[in-house]
Amino acid sequence: MPIISNANHDFSNLSLSDDSSFDRIFTEIPETETIKGVYYQRAQLIRRPEDLVSIDHALLAVINVGGNRYTFPWTTLEQFPLTRLGRLCGCRSPEDIASVCDDYDEACKEFFFDRSPSAFRVILNFLAAGKLRILREMCVLSLHDELTYWGVELTYMERCCKRKMYTRIEEMNELERHEEECRQRNAIQRIPVEETRYRKVMNWLRDMVENPQSGIPGKIFACLSVIMVAVTVISLCISTMPDLREEEERVSEIVF
């Protein structure tokens, strides 16, 4: 019985306000028994680079996921031809390999995938136990994207994790719909106003005052503003000079 496929899921008909939509999914998809991944029991994590020297590449495929290296028997990958890893068995040219993985080291015969190592660990656990479980530290949406990339079907996810993932996806869909409705309302409210002579004059004055680069009038206004500020500062400084204050006091005494 195949436990992996490239099945696509449609979440558009799910609703947070109606649990029946989720219940229908959980009842329509039969609960699968935990299948021990006997073909993947020989999958190993390579911890030291020198271990690559003793690998028989005719029997084992070296998979590098985000810097973590694993070895998988080719016979194992052949059991799942619809998955991304299984498609490596049918690669006969560099173009075929490039269409499946991100890079290939021909000297080491190593297939590189630029994906999340933690998400791939979830997939390894699934292949060993036959069940998908969401890790607490992982983003649900990110995990969903990773499962889609590797071709792992959500049918074999635990019901509690499946409900959590569907709920989170529906929340994101609701948020996107709300943002789209706000954009549409804003577009409707921004009806172009007819340009009258008064509005043109006001726009010209606003640009002249706020933007000195709008033209010569704007530059002249900016220069006058700087001059006025400078004159004000200088006059305030002069008014605080002691000699000037004494002169003002003598003038005031003569007047009075």
Image: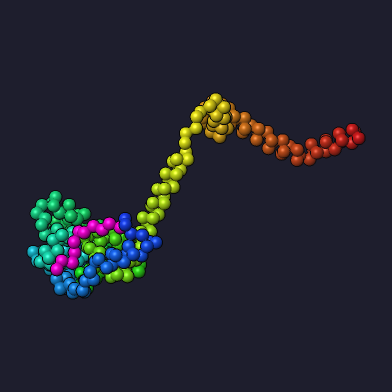
- The span picked out in magenta is 1-11
Instruction: Describe the colour scheme in one phrase.
Output: rainbow
- Give the quadrant of residue 206: top right
| Picture residue at 12% right of the left edge, 65% below the top | 79
**Most prominent secondary structure in the magenta stretch?**
loop
Look at the image and say whether residue 136 sits in the magenta stretch. no
Taking depth in this image into account, of 119 and 12 the one nearest to the observer is 12
Q: Quadrant of the N terminus?
A: bottom left
Determine whether, in the image, residue 248 is placed left or right of residue 236: right
Determine whether, in the image, residue 215 is placed left or right of residue 228: left
| Picture residue at 33% right of the left edge, 59% below the top | 14
- Give the quadrant of residue 46: bottom left
Look at the image and say whether residue 6 sits in the magenta stretch. yes
Q: Quadrant of the C terminus?
A: top right
Determine whether, in the image, residue 127 is placed left or right of residue 57: right
Tell me residue 13's x, y (percent).
Answer: 31, 57
Q: Is residue 69 visible?
A: yes
| Picture residue at 29% right of the left edge, 70% below the top | 159
| Picture residue at 22% right of the left edge, 63% below the top | 152
Tell me residue 66's x, y (percent).
Answer: 26, 61
Tell me residue 199's x, y (percent).
Answer: 55, 29
Determine whether, in the image, residue 225 is placed left or right of residue 94: right
Q: Is residue 98 above or below residue 120?
A: above
